[in-house]
Structure formats: C-alpha cells, structure tokens
Image (cartoon, helix red, strand yellow):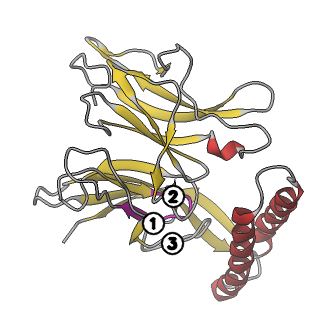
Amino acid sequence: MDLNGDGKLDILSGSYSRMGAATMAGLFHVIYGSEDGFQKAQSLVGTDKNPLIIPIVEGKDRITKAICTRPTAVDWDHDGDLDLVVGNFEGTFYLFRGKGKGTFAPSPELITCEGRELRVSGAHSDPFAVDWDGDGDLDLVSGSAQGGVEWSENVAGKGKEPELRLFKRLLKAAGHGIAAKDEPSSSTRVWVDDVNGDGKLDLLVGDNAIINHPAKGLSEAEMLEKKKEWQEKIDAVMAEMSKAPAAEDRRPRADLSKKYQELYRSRDEFMTEERTGYVWLYLRK
C-alpha cells in the first residue's frame, strides 16, 4: 500500500495507547517506505496536525468505541485519495476521509447501514474492503472477537460511495473464548485475496486459538461437560452486557463486568489452557 503517493510501499497498523491518566485511545501508525527500506513508525495525524482518534463523549460513550482494532486504506468515496476505514473494540466502523498524500480529515464519520450504525454481530470490528460479490463495487468483510467472518454487501453500484447492508455470515463464529480444533477460534482477523490464482477470492483468517486441557483429576469428557455449562453462563452475561446502558448509570454494567470476571476465573476449576494462533485458508469454490 502506497499511503502518501510517493511510489514506495508503506505499512499501516492500528494500536491503542493511554492518553492521560485514565483514557485509552486508538492510534493509527504508518511505517513509510524509503530508499533504504522503511522509516521509523509514526502516528497518522489529521489536517489539524493532531493524531487521528475516534472521539468519545465522556459520560455517554464507552471507551471501547475509541480503542481501534484495524485501519484499512482504500479509496472509499472514489475521489482519487486513500481514505481510512477503521474498526474498534465496540464492533462499529468509522471513516476518516483522505485529503491526499497521506493526510486525513481530523474527524471521523460513523459508517451506517439503513439509518443506524453498521456493526458486526460480536465485538472488535476488523474491516477489509473488497469486491466480494464481484459486482464492481467495494463491500466490507470483517472478523470479530467472537470469531467467524462476516460480509456487508454494498448496493450503491460501481463508482459510488458504498451503501452497505447488514452483515451476513460467511464463516460461523466459534464464540468468545471458545477453543476450536477444526476451524478458526475467536478474535478473527481476515484478509481476502486470490491465493491459488483461479480467479476467485479466497479467505485468509487468523485467530486467537485456545487449547484446553482437563484440570487435574478430570477426564476430557468431564471437562467438556463443565465447559459447556460455563460457556452458557458466559454467553448470558455477554448478552446482558451488550444491552447495558453506557451513559448515566454505570452500575449495572460494572456489576455485570464483575460477574464476568468471576466466571472467567472459575475456568481454573475444570480446565487449564494454552494460547496460540493459527492462519486458516478457505479456497472459494
């Protein structure tokens, strides 16, 4: 990707950093290409010279809205300049419009769908812009914290700014914290390309794999039974958290967060785990 238009390959990345005593913010970094390789990484800034961040309103928004997951550079509005489509921990998407030569508007725009925010079914949106259905316009493909891969169809038509539809499932979600043996687990990150050169777009999917082992004194069957019961409780709390208010009264969400942490720690009673990650290739038929 040539972000600043100088003919050299650049590397774009997202991260999150502490901004002040208690605020976390998603920052976007670029490593510009040079004659000798690459320059030192630097934060992308807006035309106001300040770092690009997703703003939040204190007392109204959750901090997860501002913590970015992944930026994708693409000419979203077809004006000849690269824009940034970015994800966040909350599962929504924002657009920083490009102003040419690696510069961007300082304020992002929420990407919407049918009059409301576009959102993956889980958390941690992971945008990848590509013409998935082959109709000549840019669609949006995303992984998520819960796993799997989703696709949002663009119905605007070729050469027009995208008009997206609700996400459809391309690969099923394993579930947050679920260890899968024969398919991607949670925290999926997706790349789309024609890997085998057959003219069809394929999926490359990275994950955060968790390999479970029975706790001392338990068989694998006993572990799996206890894990099933535990997962049902975790999923119920996660569902409640997604509905909890983000504004004035934070107590319900704080109570649910405490309950979630207690449940999460209780895994030690029936299993141990090791963490790794895999890259999965899905060849399109």
Q: Secondary structure at mark 2?
A: loop
Q: Position of residue 219 (x, y in %)?
A: 68, 85
Instruction: State the residue position of label 2.
Output: 144
Q: Nearer the viewer, mark 3 or mark 2?
A: 2
Residue at x-position 41% and y-position 35%: 84
Judge by depth and name the residue closer to the eye, 52 or 249.
249
Q: Are marks 2 and 1 in contact (CB under 8 Å)?
A: yes
Q: Amino acid at mark 3?
A: Ala
10 Å neighbourhood of mark 3: few (<14), some, or many (≥20)? some
Residue 12 highlighted magenta (yes or no): no
Instruction: State the residue position of label 3.
Output: 180
- The CA span between labels 3 and 2 is 15 Å
- The CA span between labels 2 and 1 is 7 Å
10 Å neighbourhood of mark 2: few (<14), some, or many (≥20)? many
Q: Secondary structure at mark 3?
A: loop
Q: Position of residue 147 (x, y in %)?
A: 50, 64
Q: Quadrant of the N terminus?
A: top left
Left or right: residue 48 versus residue 80 is right
Question: Which residue is outermost to the left?
Answer: 198
Which disc number belongs to residue 206?
Answer: none
Q: Earlier in the sequence, mark 3 or mark 2?
A: 2
Q: Tell me the quarter of the picture where residue 232 sits.
A: bottom right
Q: Amino acid at mark 1?
A: Gly
Residue at x-position 29% and y-position 27%: 81
State whether residue 30 is above or below residue 239. above
Q: Quadrant of the C terminus?
A: bottom left
Instruction: State the residue position of label 1.
Output: 148
Q: Position of residue 44 (x, y in %)?
A: 48, 22
Total number of numbered discs in the rendering: 3
Q: Tell me the quarter of the picture where residue 254 sits.
A: bottom right
Residue extent of the magenta highlight = 143-152
